[in-house]
Amino acid sequence: MSKNKNTFQTPRFRVNEQIHGHEVRIVGDGIESRVLPLNEAKKIACAMGLDLIEINPNGPTPIVKVASYDKMLYELKKAAKKNKQHTKPLKEVQLSVNIASHDLETKANQAKKFIENGSKVKVVLTMRGRELARRDDNKKSILEFITLLDEVAVPESMPKDEGNKTIVILKKRG
Protein backbone atom coordinates (compact mmCIF):
# COMPACT_ATOMS: atom_id res chain seq x y z
CA MET A 1 0.00 0.00 0.00
CA SER A 2 1.61 3.28 -1.10
CA LYS A 3 1.08 6.49 0.79
CA ASN A 4 0.32 9.59 -1.22
CA LYS A 5 1.61 12.78 0.38
CA ASN A 6 -0.91 14.94 -1.48
CA THR A 7 -4.00 13.45 0.15
CA PHE A 8 -6.12 15.93 2.04
CA GLN A 9 -7.40 14.75 5.40
CA THR A 10 -11.10 15.58 5.39
CA PRO A 11 -12.10 17.14 8.70
CA ARG A 12 -14.91 15.38 10.51
CA PHE A 13 -17.96 17.60 10.83
CA ARG A 14 -21.38 16.43 11.88
CA VAL A 15 -23.96 17.47 9.30
CA ASN A 16 -27.77 17.82 9.42
CA GLU A 17 -29.23 14.68 11.10
CA GLN A 18 -25.87 13.73 12.70
CA ILE A 19 -26.04 16.77 15.03
CA HIS A 20 -27.31 16.03 18.53
CA GLY A 21 -28.46 18.33 21.30
CA HIS A 22 -31.34 20.56 22.29
CA GLU A 23 -30.10 24.09 21.64
CA VAL A 24 -27.47 25.38 19.21
CA ARG A 25 -25.93 28.73 18.28
CA ILE A 26 -26.60 29.32 14.60
CA VAL A 27 -24.26 31.36 12.34
CA GLY A 28 -23.91 31.84 8.60
CA ASP A 29 -24.08 34.35 5.77
CA GLY A 30 -27.13 36.56 6.16
CA ILE A 31 -28.10 34.91 9.46
CA GLU A 32 -28.11 36.68 12.79
CA SER A 33 -26.07 34.75 15.36
CA ARG A 34 -28.43 33.51 18.06
CA VAL A 35 -29.25 30.49 20.23
CA LEU A 36 -32.30 28.48 19.23
CA PRO A 37 -33.65 24.90 19.34
CA LEU A 38 -31.94 22.38 17.05
CA ASN A 39 -35.09 21.47 15.11
CA GLU A 40 -35.70 25.17 14.33
CA ALA A 41 -32.11 25.54 13.07
CA LYS A 42 -32.63 22.50 10.82
CA LYS A 43 -35.80 24.10 9.41
CA ILE A 44 -33.91 27.33 8.63
CA ALA A 45 -31.17 25.41 6.81
CA CYS A 46 -33.71 23.34 4.88
CA ALA A 47 -35.66 26.46 3.86
CA MET A 48 -32.46 28.00 2.48
CA GLY A 49 -31.55 24.77 0.65
CA LEU A 50 -28.28 24.46 2.57
CA ASP A 51 -26.74 22.13 5.14
CA LEU A 52 -26.47 22.57 8.89
CA ILE A 53 -22.80 21.93 9.81
CA GLU A 54 -21.56 21.58 13.39
CA ILE A 55 -18.47 23.80 13.57
CA ASN A 56 -17.72 23.62 17.31
CA PRO A 57 -19.37 20.87 19.36
CA ASN A 58 -17.60 21.96 22.59
CA GLY A 59 -18.96 24.59 24.91
CA PRO A 60 -22.29 25.21 26.58
CA THR A 61 -24.13 25.38 23.23
CA PRO A 62 -22.74 23.79 20.04
CA ILE A 63 -22.07 26.20 17.18
CA VAL A 64 -23.61 25.28 13.82
CA LYS A 65 -23.22 27.00 10.47
CA VAL A 66 -25.73 27.19 7.65
CA ALA A 67 -23.73 26.58 4.45
CA SER A 68 -23.18 24.14 1.60
CA TYR A 69 -21.14 21.24 3.03
CA ASP A 70 -19.56 20.33 -0.33
CA LYS A 71 -18.55 23.94 -0.99
CA MET A 72 -17.04 24.25 2.50
CA LEU A 73 -14.95 21.09 2.01
CA TYR A 74 -13.82 22.31 -1.41
CA GLU A 75 -12.67 25.64 0.05
CA LEU A 76 -10.82 23.88 2.91
CA LYS A 77 -8.97 21.66 0.37
CA LYS A 78 -8.14 24.69 -1.75
CA ALA A 79 -6.76 26.60 1.26
CA ALA A 80 -4.66 23.59 2.37
CA LYS A 81 -3.23 23.23 -1.13
CA LYS A 82 -2.39 26.94 -1.31
CA ASN A 83 -0.62 26.84 2.07
CA LYS A 84 1.38 23.79 1.00
CA GLN A 85 2.59 25.41 -2.25
CA HIS A 86 4.25 28.39 -0.61
CA THR A 87 6.57 26.54 1.71
CA LYS A 88 10.12 26.53 0.38
CA PRO A 89 12.89 24.82 2.32
CA LEU A 90 15.50 26.81 4.21
CA LYS A 91 18.92 26.15 2.66
CA GLU A 92 22.10 26.34 4.72
CA VAL A 93 25.60 27.51 3.80
CA GLN A 94 28.51 26.77 6.18
CA LEU A 95 31.39 29.24 6.43
CA SER A 96 34.59 29.16 8.44
CA VAL A 97 36.67 32.05 9.74
CA ASN A 98 39.68 31.51 7.46
CA ILE A 99 37.79 30.78 4.25
CA ALA A 100 39.61 31.58 1.01
CA SER A 101 38.11 34.30 -1.20
CA HIS A 102 37.50 31.89 -4.11
CA ASP A 103 35.71 29.42 -1.81
CA LEU A 104 33.60 32.30 -0.47
CA GLU A 105 32.65 33.31 -4.03
CA THR A 106 31.75 29.71 -4.89
CA LYS A 107 29.49 29.44 -1.85
CA ALA A 108 27.97 32.85 -2.68
CA ASN A 109 27.14 31.66 -6.21
CA GLN A 110 25.47 28.56 -4.82
CA ALA A 111 23.49 30.65 -2.32
CA LYS A 112 22.50 32.99 -5.17
CA LYS A 113 20.95 30.01 -7.02
CA PHE A 114 19.03 29.01 -3.89
CA ILE A 115 17.67 32.54 -3.43
CA GLU A 116 16.67 32.88 -7.09
CA ASN A 117 14.71 29.63 -6.75
CA GLY A 118 12.72 31.21 -3.91
CA SER A 119 14.39 29.66 -0.87
CA LYS A 120 15.84 31.50 2.09
CA VAL A 121 19.49 30.88 2.93
CA LYS A 122 20.81 30.39 6.45
CA VAL A 123 24.49 31.37 6.62
CA VAL A 124 26.38 29.77 9.52
CA LEU A 125 29.89 30.94 10.49
CA THR A 126 31.49 28.38 12.83
CA MET A 127 34.37 29.38 15.12
CA ARG A 128 36.66 27.04 17.02
CA GLY A 129 39.10 27.40 19.92
CA ARG A 130 40.96 30.72 19.96
CA GLU A 131 38.80 32.08 17.13
CA LEU A 132 36.05 32.61 19.71
CA ALA A 133 38.17 35.22 21.53
CA ARG A 134 38.17 37.46 18.44
CA ARG A 135 34.50 37.09 17.55
CA ASP A 136 34.05 40.61 16.09
CA ASP A 137 37.15 40.33 13.86
CA ASN A 138 36.01 36.93 12.61
CA LYS A 139 32.64 38.24 11.42
CA LYS A 140 34.30 39.83 8.38
CA SER A 141 33.84 36.66 6.30
CA ILE A 142 30.09 36.56 6.95
CA LEU A 143 29.80 40.29 6.19
CA GLU A 144 31.80 39.83 2.98
CA PHE A 145 29.44 36.98 2.04
CA ILE A 146 26.43 39.28 2.55
CA THR A 147 27.98 41.98 0.34
CA LEU A 148 28.64 39.40 -2.42
CA LEU A 149 24.91 38.65 -2.46
CA ASP A 150 23.85 42.27 -2.07
CA GLU A 151 22.21 42.49 -5.52
CA VAL A 152 19.87 39.50 -4.98
CA ALA A 153 19.43 39.14 -1.21
CA VAL A 154 18.99 41.10 1.99
CA PRO A 155 19.51 39.86 5.55
CA GLU A 156 16.34 39.41 7.63
CA SER A 157 18.20 40.72 10.68
CA MET A 158 21.70 41.43 11.92
CA PRO A 159 24.00 38.40 12.38
CA LYS A 160 23.27 36.67 15.71
CA ASP A 161 25.78 34.91 17.95
CA GLU A 162 24.70 31.48 19.18
CA GLY A 163 27.44 29.70 21.08
CA ASN A 164 30.38 29.12 18.75
CA LYS A 165 28.34 30.12 15.67
CA THR A 166 27.20 33.34 14.06
CA ILE A 167 24.00 32.99 12.06
CA VAL A 168 22.19 35.21 9.57
CA ILE A 169 19.25 34.39 7.29
CA LEU A 170 19.15 35.92 3.81
CA LYS A 171 15.97 36.39 1.81
CA LYS A 172 15.24 37.50 -1.72
CA ARG A 173 15.48 41.23 -2.32
CA GLY A 174 12.07 42.50 -3.15
Image (spheres, rainbow, N blue to C red):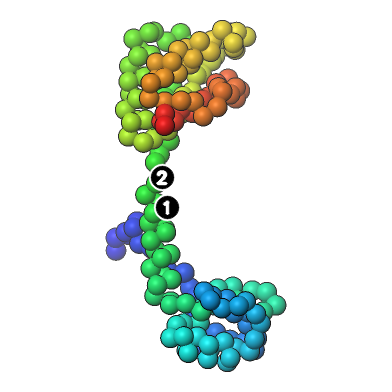
Residue topped by disc 2: 87
Is 48 displayed left or right of 59 in the figure?
Answer: left
Write down the residue under mark 1. 83
Which residue: 59% across, 12% down? Answer: 135
Q: Nearer the viewer, residue 110 or 155?
A: 155
Q: Position of residue 56 (x, y in %)?
A: 59, 73
Task: Describe the element under mark 2 as helix, strand or loop.
Answer: loop
Is residue 145 in view from this perspective? no
Please give the name of the residue rendered at 40% of the width and 39% of the height, measured from the top-left corner.
89
- In the rendering, at what x and y percent does residue 148 appear? 39, 16
Left or right, residue 24 beside residue 107: right
Q: Residues within 10 Å of mark 1 (few under 14, many from 20)?
A: few
Type of residue at label 1?
Asn
Q: Is residue 162 above or below residue 25?
A: above
Label 2 and label 1: CA atoms lie apart by 7 Å
Circles 2 and 1: CB distance less than 8 Å? yes
Helix or strand or loop: what does disc 1 sit on? Answer: helix
At x 42% / y 29%, what residue is drawn? Answer: 173
The C terminus sits in image quarter: top left
